[in-house]
Amino acid sequence: MRVLLPLDHLDELWPTKFRGARIGALLHPASVCSSLEHASRIFEKFNGDLFHLTAFFGPQHGFLGQTQDNMLEWKDYEHPRLHAPVYSLYGEHREPTAEMLDGLDVLLVDLQDIGARYYTFIWTLYLCMRACERAGVGVVVLDRPNPINGVTVEGPGFDPNYKSFVGMHPIPVRHGRTIGELAEQFRQEAFPDCQLSILPLKNWNRAMWFDQTGLPWVMPSPNMPTLDTATVYPGMCLLEGTNISEGRGTTRPFEIFGAPFIDAEKLCNKLNNLKLSGVFFRENYFQPTFNKFADQLCGGGQIYVMDRDVFRPFLTGVEIIKCIHKIYGDQFEWKQPPYEYEWTRLPIEVLIGGPIESVFGD
């Protein structure tokens, strides 16, 4: 039975107390219903009946998903069809200002998360909840499936001293929650006065992967093209904290990795000899079009997840980094700041949410 999204029957779920409210909507390209109609067009149909659509907001990579590379800011603009402001929450501001929220009764959030603490959309939600609590604006979250299932949890604990835009509240790296469940956790643990309503999924169960929901995959960000990408991301994103390419600038970001100084055959033999659960490493060669080593030939590997139920992406990402560091210690480097608005801590520490020794040892 296909999973039903709140967007598929919004008129049935919309809270009575917010009927006729003036709303802003935080959206991105994957904010679509099961027939691929974008939320902005669905909201337009209900405009003036269920609510009054007043403004839009967009997270990292833009309301349209237009910023391809990582850590590229974008600016506010006017929606060309609806002539409403589209406010950037990944630029001069990452949290809605009082001016942005002025005149709104409700901020509606419909974002497809991918199940990993580093993925910044959940922290945009977090900051929106903080701003809305302060401004007395309600928050309505349209729930969506966790694409890599709602059962498996993985990764280290979170040190509050390492808060950043890739980790603002203690949750595991692979958190096993839907975005609605995270919103409820944030309300309970951080924003008790936030007027939060969550519109639920129908027919979803925790063990489901996205390809079992019957829903179409839409890229929530430019470098998240497939469910395969999301499956490996909780570990392979760690490479952003190193000088090793995580495959940005290729057609398989996060699934392929390497550097010009790596012997692909040697590395993959070493990795396969570790006999990590559910994964095989195929030697691979690639030439990124942008980001690390643009236009340079890299040797490395491609990850093949053979059994996703036993595969542990965070552990796998850690072992890849350890193996490369051991073989190529004179060329391997930890990436230096800045990274995601953090100017002092190492990016790898920002990603793991604690000191580097807590995961990688001395």
Image (cartoon, rainbow, N blue to C red):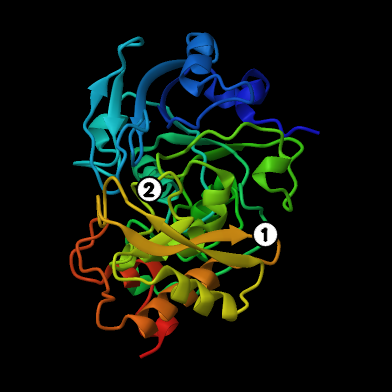
Taking depth in this image into account, of 171 and 241 the one nearest to the observer is 241
Q: Decide: is 164 above or below 224.
A: below
Q: Decide: is 244 above or below 165.
A: below
Asked whether residue 175 is in view, the answer is no
**Residue 193, label in figure:** none
Left or right: 279 in relation to 325: right
| Residue on which disc 2 sits | 130
| Position of residue 357 measured from the top left corner of the image (x, y, whole percent) | 37, 85
**Quadrant assignment, res 257:** bottom left
SS at badge 1: loop
Residue at x-position 45% and y-position 76%: 266
Q: Residues within 10 Å of mark 2 (few under 14, many from 20)?
A: many
| Position of residue 276 measured from the top left corner of the image (x, y, whole percent) | 61, 75
| Position of residue 66 measured from the top left corner of the image (x, y, whole percent) | 32, 31
Asked whether residue 135 is in view, the answer is yes
Q: Decide: is 143 above or below 186.
A: above
SS at badge 2: helix
Earlier in the chain: of badge 1 and badge 2, it is 2
Left or right: 150 in relation to 174: right
Amino acid type of the residue tagged 1 in the rendering: Arg
Mark 1–mark 2 Cα distance, whole angstroms, equals 36 Å
| Residue on which disc 1 sits | 308
Q: Quadrant of the C terminus?
A: bottom left
Residue at x-position 35% and y-position 71%: 262
Taking depth in this image into account, of 247 and 203 the one nearest to the observer is 247
Residue at x-position 81% and y-position 34%: 1
Q: Residues within 10 Å of mark 1 (few under 14, many from 20)?
A: some
Amino acid type of the residue tagged 2 in the rendering: Arg
